[in-house]
Amino acid sequence: MVDQKLIDLARETLLKKTNIAVLTGSGISAESGIPTFRGEDGLWKKYSPEEFGTVPGLLLQFAKNPRRIIEFALNLLEVFTKAQPNPGHIALARLEQKYRKNVTIITQNIDDLHEIAGNTNVLKLHGDLFRLRCIKCGHREKIDREYLENYMKKLRDILSSPLKIVKEGKELLPRCPECGGIMRPDVVFFGEALPQKELSLAYIAVDAAEVMLVIGTSGEVYPANTLPYRAKQNGATVIEVNPQRTIFSDMVDIFIEGKAGEVLPRIIP
Ligand code: APR
């Protein structure tokens, strides 16, 4: 049972301040049907992060068993293109739209749910599934759900025959309109650098924050997991929402045990 006193304290704290930084992880999208990474049914429980979370691992897997990689990509794309913002995302958007707070969403997620919910200042530290990047010239292209739905049709067609996997497998990734190079999803795999612009802006937002919300993240991954400590050191009030305690929970000012989709609408009505 969520502690109503903590909910009221969190709401009073948030609504009397202006500059708010929010760090989100996969837990905020769990109620939208997107799997977390480390929960009991987390992605890294089903797929090894070394093989499916790194570029060398994916390339090696593709060479050994292209069908498995295509099916992995298809399953993920189906989840991401079907997902809709849940009451947790929508409550965070209310903080900006209804309460006119200066809100910076710093997310580790690659989905588009904060934007669809209505937050306009979203920093994606681990990249964006809805953006492609050319591995040759660095050109970037925004893509939408329709593009991904058409791409999924292509993947299903290739999977329909072993011959197609061999023949068309090499041309799976789109070509850059600028230089003809291969374009890849603009997401950060393990061992890759984070986007410097987003990271610098995240530090600025955390340093200016009067309140920091930490929602749905295990805090396992650096450097995102340093941000709540940085906010705390700068005098911000730190509020965490998670069904389980995490490495942050002893440090935060308010820990509310519960799901984002259930707790956030009660903190931000
Ligand atoms: N509401 C809020 N929190 C939830 C919910 C929910 N409904 N369901 C699960 N959680 C919490 C879990 O208790 C856990 O603390 O969300 C957290 C998810 O943790 P992880 O699976 O480790 O995901 P995350 O913290 O986002 O991982 C960070 O690791 O693999 C990399 O790049 C990947 O961005 C990811 C990064």
Image (cartoon, rainbow, N blue to C red):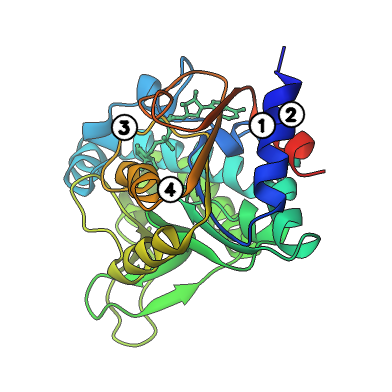
* Mark 2 surroundings within 10 Å by alpha-carbon count, few (fewer than 14), some (14 through 19), many (20 or more): some
Q: Nearer the viewer, mark 2 or mark 1?
A: 2
Q: Is mark 4 within 8 Å of ligand 1?
A: yes
Which amino acid, mark 3?
Answer: Glu
Residue in the image at 37% along x and 62% along y: 186
Secondary structure type for disc 4: loop
Q: Where residue 31 is drawn, which disc sits there?
A: 1
Q: Nearer the viewer, mark 3 or mark 1?
A: 3
Asked if the residue under mark 1 is in contact with the one under mark 4, i.e. CB atoms within 8 Å, the reply is: no
| Residue 264 point in image, percent of width and height | 70, 37
Residue in the image at 51% along x and 18% along y: 244
Which amino acid, mark 2?
Answer: Glu
Q: Is mark 1 within 8 Å of ligand 1?
A: yes
Identify the residue under disc 4: 108
State the residue in front, 60 or 31: 31
Q: Nearer the viewer, mark 4 or mark 2?
A: 2
Which amino acid, mark 1?
Answer: Glu
* Mark 1 surroundings within 10 Å by alpha-carbon count, few (fewer than 14), some (14 through 19), many (20 or more): some
| Residue 79 point in image, percent of width and height | 59, 39
